[in-house]
Amino acid sequence: MASFTLHIPDDLKNKMNEHPDINWPEYIKQRFMVRLTQLERFEQLVSEGKI
């Protein structure tokens, strides 16, 4: 599995720390997958001339 490093502002990290029940790396991974799926669908619609 590949590794990805993300730098975020301290104030954002502090807010994230207020929610230790959230698995932030897993959340971010899932959000990346959702966005990539949306982009792939958009590209498909464009290639089909529907957009």
Image (cartoon, helix red, strand yellow):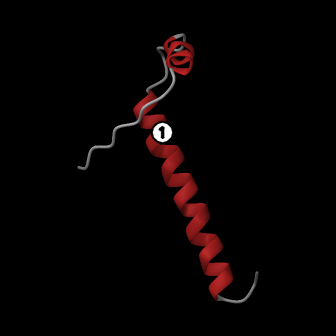
Badge count = 1
Give the residue at x 56% y 21%.
Answer: 12
7 or 41: nearer the viewer:
7
Is 6 above or below relative to 43? above
Furthest toward the left, the residue is: 1
Is 38 above or below relative to 26? below
Is 37 above or below relative to 42? above
Q: Which residue is mark 1?
A: 28
Q: Secondary structure at mark 1?
A: helix
Is 45 above or below relative to 39? below
Report which quarter residue 41 is drawn in: bottom right
Give the residue at x 53% y 14%.
Answer: 19
x, y (%) of residue 36? 52, 60
- Crowding near the residue tagged with mark 1, few <14, some 14–19, many ≥20 C-alpha atoms within 10 Å: few
x, y (%) of residue 16? 53, 18
Give the residue at x 72% y 89%.
Answer: 49
46 or 6: nearer the viewer:
6
Give the residue at x 61% y 79%.
Answer: 44
- Give the residue type that dot 1 points to: Ile
Image quadrant in which the C terminus is located: bottom right
**Left or right relative to 46: residue 28:** left
x, y (%) of residue 42? 65, 72
Furthest toward the right, the residue is: 51
x, y (%) of residue 45? 67, 80
